[in-house]
Amino acid sequence: MAASNTQPPAIELRGISKAFGPVQANKDISISVRPGSIHGIIGENGAGKSTLMSILYGFYKADKGEVWINGTKTDIPDSQAAIASGIGMVFQHFKLVENFTVLENIVLGAEDGGLLRPSLAKARGELEHLAKEYELNVDPDAVTENLSVGHQQRVEILKALYRQAQILILDEPTGVLTPSEADQLFRILDRLRSEGKTIVLITHKLREIMEYTDTVSVMRRGEMTATVKTAETNPEHLAELMVGRKVLLRVDKTPAQPGKPILEVEKLRVVDGNGVERVKGIDLTVRAGEIVGIAGVAGNGQSELLEVLGGMRPGEGTVRLNGKELPLTGSGSDGRARRAVHIAHVPEDRHREALIMNFSAWENAVFGYHHDARWTSGPFIKNAAILEEAHQMMGRFDVRPPNPRLAAKSFSGGNQQKIVLAREIERNPDLLMIGQPTRGVDIGAIEFIHQQIVALRDQGKAILLVSVELEEILSLADRVAVMFDGHIMGERDAAATDERELGLLMAGVTGEDAA
């Protein structure tokens, strides 16, 4: 349902400014969003995108400026006022009560009176209608923690629609979705747009912007640098507006020169705590001077593979590093032992497995290696030496701001990832295992991270890369192995395959099946 030219903007922000202490998050920002459109907002991590939308949703109060909704000046002191104004927001990290059912989460905060049963009955009927109308099918009686991430996101959208949102803000909605879940999300958003809803999409993925938005606004360092019709721009131009310089959107690398086998995996099996076999007897080799990418939809054994190799969980089978067998259970099978034989590991979830968010950057820069003789003197740790090394390391890896005393939580996602990468790469590993290297990372940081991985390969190191981003796998990897249901369905030369062929293997369809 296209908006007529006479309709006022669904959203108009005029001269919005917001500071947190000395940090100017938003500076005199004005933006207009047409009703019934998908409007993209892009920018590097820390550019101020989420702050701006949090002001619109009432999470923050602007220091100055005005908010206009459908042509009416509107005061939004809190999220309840935003909801009353027809605004809904789906955050990057969902705001759901995990042990509640879908229905209970939908109703929470929108109950009709003091009796819950009538509210649940009303919500069930409305939920069935919304699910059918917008293809947001989800079991209303399912416990939220048992749902996939994609279905949890549907619950968040349903929550907003149940509250009669006409404007829907999504903050990095595909950062935690598989490719198929992301495709389904955008089909839903297209349906919402056709029904006259207004969508604001915050993302750092230029492909999503180019494919799905009508208009795109670019932010840099708290300011709005441009607003253009999507059809009148291109990824290279947007990337330059975001970063302030030309950005290479492809990975610049020479052909690999593989050497001797560094990692050899034979008949590896992994059984989880519930007795479910996650990795089912796979074989894999990674050689010096090559990047082997593991492609697959999340949940098909890639995470468990990295965890066993990184000493985070037990396994069965044979794993050799530089020809020497590594224990997979018991003594010598933990992460410290893996680091001692020169295996470095960048986990998939940097918040849970790679960083302690309340600790400083300099402390995080040495975690896992703090027992090394370089950093100890008897029972004491050389804090001053670590602090100085962390400062230099942050400079080499372009961590912003380059302040090692700041807590890890004070850095953007891209800079947190650089801290983890720096810690692991600077230990000169024989094997670097890296999971989801650029998840939630902006385009400037993606370019830098890719360059570091390729540079390590060119030094003759072995790289094992896991990513749900097929484009990233094809750009970075020299060889691709595809996992499905705990098996390796096949291996391909990255230069001789494409997303279609890999997508079929990811769905469990081999060449013989396709024929």
Image: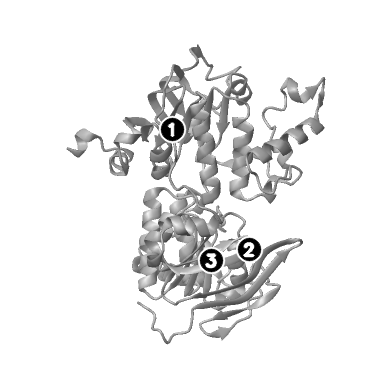
Q: Which residue is mark 3?
A: 89
Query: Eyeballing the image, is 148 above or below 336?
Result: below
Of marks 2 and 3, which one's residue comes earlier in the chain? 3
- Seen as rendered, the residue at the extreme front is 246
Q: CA distance from mark 2 to mark 3?
A: 21 Å
Of 472 and 259, the residue lying toward us: 259
Of 195 and 465, the residue lying toward us: 465
Q: CA distance from mark 1 to mark 3?
A: 36 Å
Q: Residues within 10 Å of mark 1 (few under 14, many from 20)?
A: few
Q: Name the amino acid type tagged 3.
A: Met
Residue 494, image x, y percentages: 35, 34
Q: Which residue is mark 1?
A: 276
Q: Which residue is mark 2?
A: 222
Q: Is residue 222 visible?
A: yes
Left or right of 214? Residue 346 is: right
- Seen as rendered, the residue at the extreme bottom is 6
Q: CA distance from mark 1 to mark 2?
A: 48 Å
Residue 326, image x, y percentages: 53, 16
Query: Eyeballing the image, is 219 above or below 308?
Result: below
- Which quadrant of the figure has residue 26? bottom right
Label 2: state its secondary structure: loop
Left or right of 391? Residue 251 is: left
